[in-house]
Amino acid sequence: MTQTNWDAVDGFIEEKLLPYDAALEAALAANRSHGLPAIDVSPAQGKLLHLLARMCGASRILEIGTLGGYSTIWLARALPEGGKVVTLEIDPRHAEVARANVENAGLADRVDIRIGPALKSLEEIGEGGEPFDLVFIDADKPNNANYLDWALRLSRPGTVIICDNVVRNGAVLDESDSDPNVVGVRASLSLLGNTPGLEATAIQTVGVKGYDGFAIGIVG
Ligand code: SAH
Ligand code: DHB
Ligand code: MG
């Protein structure tokens, strides 16, 4: 099996299970025309996030790493009336494209885009506020364990935590790899495994984004 098969099967899954969606397609087109890196979650992955958010009835969602808001739109569409996605993005150009995409999708009233380094925004969000029901971590990988730490502080028992890109073509296996992205992902997997009460797993994925994976956990 090769990337060609993975692309074709993702195309087939989209054809069978993901009806054409003008706002999502427009968001991807805008992201590419503004030169944002093509690292949005895939359509099938976006829908997985959406389904997970609905399955756990999430009404307060935290996303770390907005890019052009493609995953944000999938998540925001899972919200019940009065729900909110807070999404953190360091690059004001990305946030501006995301703002327009979210507006075009009719979701501006339920998406709060915070511009700045996520660790700074997380400190502002702070502890002690209303906890989030679902947290999606998908920003700079060297900070993954820090983001997971914050996700735990901003959680309640039952909060679902999802991390993107935990396999990276299998690079995660190599404990001698000094790439800060790999070191960061390995640290977050260790923390997921060692935090009392947190139950987590990771699933390897193939598809239009190549060979990667998601980690998913539930706070005890
Ligand atoms: N979740 C998006 C993809 C996010 S890509 C989607 O699937 O559609 C990762 C994003 O994290 C990029 O836009 C990048 O600018 C942002 N990022 C990188 N470092 C960051 C930091 N320190 N704080 C906040 N955002 C950061
Ligand atoms: C990269 C980052 C991502 O969040 C992703 O989903 C794919 C690739 C990257 O930085 O290369
Ligand atoms: Mg990602």
Image (tube, rainbow, N blue to C red):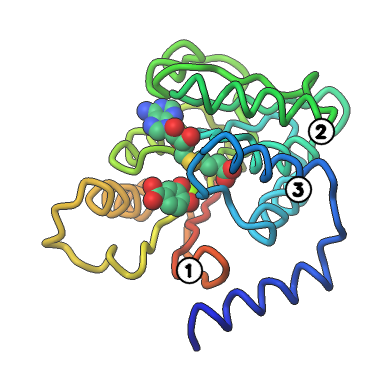
Q: What SS does tag 2 mark?
A: loop
Lower sequence index among marks 3 and 2: 3
Residue marked by disc 1: 210
Q: Earlier in the sequence, mark 1 or mark 3?
A: 3
Q: Position of residue 98 (x, y in %)?
A: 64, 29
Whether residue 139 appears in this view of the structure is yes
Q: Tell me if mark 3 has few (under 14), some (14-19) or many (20+) residues whose alpha carbon lies within 10 angstroms of its own.
A: some
| Up-down relation of residue 195 to residue 102 (above or below) | below
Q: Secondary structure at mark 3?
A: helix
Residue 215: horizontal and vertical position, in percent?
48, 57
Mark closer to the observer (1, 3) = 3
Neighbor class of circle 2 (other Cα within 10 Å; few <14, some 14-19, many 20+) is: some
Relative to the observer, which residue lies in front, 129 or 64?
64
Secondary structure under tag 1 reads strand
Q: For the residue with label 1, is its CB less than 8 Å from the closest atom of ligand 2?
A: no
Q: Percent x, y for residue 218?
A: 55, 49
Q: Is residue 103 left or right of residue 168?
A: right
Taking the spot 55% from the left edge, 17% from the top edge, the residue there is 114
- Residue position marked by numbered label 2 in the rendering: 105
Left or right: 216 as drawn, with respect to 141: right
Q: Amino acid at mark 3?
A: Glu
Mark closest to the chain's N terminus, 1 or 2: 2
Q: Name the residue at 55% across, 33% down.
A: 66
Mark whose residue sits in front, 3 or 2:
3
Where, by quadrant of the figure, is residue 107 drawn?
A: top right
Q: CA distance from mark 3 to mark 2?
A: 10 Å
Residue 99 to residue 58: above or below: above
Q: State the mark number for residue 25.
A: 3
- Separation (CA) of disc 1 from disc 3: 20 Å
